[in-house]
Amino acid sequence: MTASIVDITPSYYLLLAALLFSIGVVGVMVRRNPLVLFMCIELMLNAVNLTFVAFAKRAGDVGGETTVFFVMVVAAAEVVVGLGIIVAILRRRPNATTDDLAELKG
């Protein structure tokens, strides 16, 4: 096996997670489409999962991976419900924005 030029350390994963989280935050702040907003929130959630895994690797503990497993289960349930609601709204009003969705509050 050949030696690599750069060893991948958890710091690289943390840097990637920070970049992904920043892209998600900018997307949430700038975009008005509910579907894009939902994808940016999922991107932020995956960045946090990557951070948990990087810290678990650095600590040599499986606690981070266990947390990621439960977060992914909850995120899958959130995607099913949230995406269903967003798609139903966008089918009725194709050009709906997040400002329009704020009017749906009781």
Image (cartoon, rainbow, N blue to C red):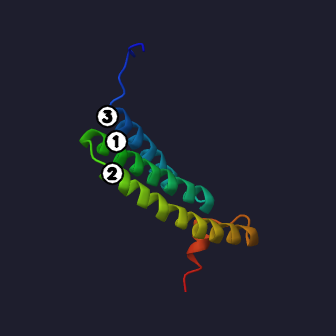
Q: CA distance from mark 1 to mark 2?
A: 8 Å
Name the kind of residue labelled 3 in the image. Ser
The answer to whether residue 79 is left or right of residue 60 is right
Image-quadrant location for residue 45:
bottom left
Query: Element type at marker 2?
Result: helix
Above or below 25: residue 75: below
Q: CA distance from mark 2 to mark 3?
A: 16 Å
Q: Quadrant of the C terminus?
A: bottom right
> Is 54 situated left or right of 104 in this image?
left
> Residue 26: percent from the left, percent from the top?
47, 49
Q: Nearer the viewer, mark 2 or mark 3?
A: 2
Do tag 1 and tag 2 residues touch (Cβ < 8 Å)? yes
- Tell me if 91 is positioned left or right of 57 in this view: right
The alpha-carbon separation of the residues under discs 3 and 1 comes to 8 Å
Q: Which residue is mark 2?
A: 64
Q: Residue at x 68, y 71 (%)?
A: 89
At which x and y percent is residue 6? 37, 19
How far across and down, in percent of the image, does residue 31 sit? 56, 55
58 versus 65 height, above or below: above
Compare residues 3 and 17 and report the one nearer the observer: 3
Q: Name which of mark 2 and mark 3 comes first in the sequence.
A: 3
**Relative to 49, is 3 above or below?**
above
Q: Earlier in the sequence, mark 1 or mark 2?
A: 1
Mark in the foreground, 3 or 1: 1
Q: Which residue is mark 3?
A: 11
**Dot 2: few (<14), some (14–19), or many (≥20) neighbours within 10 Å?**
some
Q: Residue at x 58, y 68 (%)?
A: 82
Residue 54 image label: 1
Residue nearest the viewer, comparing 50 with 41: 50
